[in-house]
Amino acid sequence: MSETYDKQLRDLLETILISSDPKRDNRNFKTNMKIRAVPQQTFVMVLAIHEDDEKNKIEKISCDRGIPLGGYVYDSMNECFFISCVDLLPLGYVPVSFKLEMKGNAFWEVDIPMPENVLRRYFGDSQLHDLQRFKSIHPKGECKFQFLQFIVNA
């Protein structure tokens, strides 16, 4: 009986995978999703993450600046993140945040982080200068840069 069940399950999964159309699914998602800017500040930090993980250290970053966006290790008791990086720099605030919405789901929305090119449009001159200086300190081939973002509580 177990072999029969396994075969039926495999056949069902194969049918689902064969009949799906990932390109069409992606196209449908893109046409039904909407990104909306909201006038809510975002606090931004840049992280330098060394390619050689042994050179990174664990940093404890408080979430007292707002609602954190990202998939980092979160300590809910102390309301902080633990992030492995070689260095970090708080860049300050930008005057906007973004939400993702879906047509046909009026009550669903989620805060989303901004990519670097969008962040740069909202950075002031001193923030851009600080970011450029921070990146110049860390060799390009040895470190990658990520932006930790916090939606400021209203």
Image: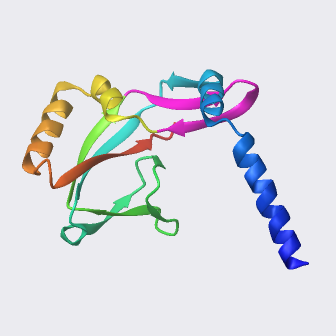
Looking at the image, the residue that sits furthest to the bottom is: 1
Compare residues 71 and 78 and report the one nearer the observer.
71
Residue at (10, 51) in percent of width and height: 139
Q: Is residue 12 above or below residue 84?
A: above
Query: Per the image, is 102 magenta?
Result: yes
Q: Residue at x 22, y 60 (%)?
A: 51
**How would you classify the magenta stretch by its main secondary structure?**
strand
Q: Residue at x 39, y 44 (%)?
A: 149
Relative placement, left or right, of 29 versus 153 is right
The answer to which of 72 and 65 lies nearer the viewer is: 72
Image quarter in which the N terminus is found: bottom right
Q: Residue furthest right?
A: 1
Above/below status of 62 relative to 19: below
Residue 105: x percent and y percent? 75, 30
Residue numbers of the magenta segment: 95-112
**Quick check: 63 above or below 78?**
above
- Residue name at image x 81 percent, y 55 percent: 12
